[in-house]
């Protein structure tokens, strides 16, 4: 196990999970970190002219990972006490 993952492994080692469950938790966490790195890399390497499409694609990827059928990005205006749903992704029915 890589050194950077040992702290995470230690934190779940004190739970009531058996070794197989612990391994699955760590593996899922690593896959999620990889997804976030890939999404971040896409933004870093983009000129952001297609930011709307990139955001929707990111929402879709995250939803698929967590097995959700919809995802949203909200914009909060604390001065005017308003909230706007600026982006969303919904799975097809």
Image (cartoon, helix red, strand yellow):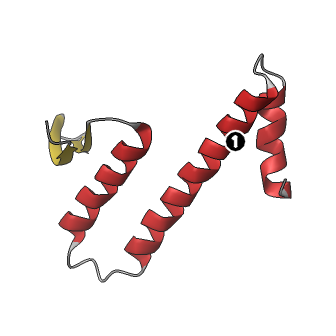
Residue 18, placed above or below residue 77 = above
On the image, the x and y values in percent for residue 13 come to 83, 29
Residue 35, placed above or below residue 93 = below
Q: Residue at x 19, y 64 (%)?
A: 52
| Front position in the image: 25 or 3 | 25
What residue does disc 1 label?
A: 26
On the image, the x and y values in percent for residue 91 come to 20, 42
Q: Residue at x 58, y 52 (%)?
A: 31
Classify residue 64 by image quadrant: top left
| Front position in the image: 12 or 76 | 12
Residue 31, placed above or below residue 15 = below
On the image, the x and y values in percent for residue 53 come to 20, 66
Q: Residue at x 18, y 34 (%)?
A: 81
Classify residue 79 by image quadrant: top left
Left or right: 72 as drawn, with respect to 45: left
Residues packed near mark 1 inside 10 Å, few (<14), some (14 to 19) or many (20 plus): some
Left or right: 63 as drawn, with respect to 83: right
Q: Quadrant of the C terminus?
A: top left
Classify residue 66 by image quadrant: top left
Extreme top residue here?
16
Q: Determine the secondary structure under disc 1.
A: helix
Q: Residue at x 33, y 35 (%)?
A: 68
On the image, the x and y values in percent for residue 10 come to 84, 36
């Amino acid at each position: 196990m890589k050194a950077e993952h040992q702290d995470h492994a230690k934190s779940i080692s004190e739970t009531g999970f058996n070794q197989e469950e612990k391994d699955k938790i760590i593996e899922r966490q690593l896959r999620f970190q990889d997804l976030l790195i890939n999404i971040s890399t896409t933004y870093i390497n983009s000129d952001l002219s297609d930011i709307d499409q990139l955001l929707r694609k990111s929402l879709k990827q995250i939803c698929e990972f967590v097995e959700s059928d919809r995802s949203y990005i909200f914009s909060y205006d604390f001065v005017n006490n308003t909230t706007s749903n600026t982006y969303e992704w919904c799975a097809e029915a």
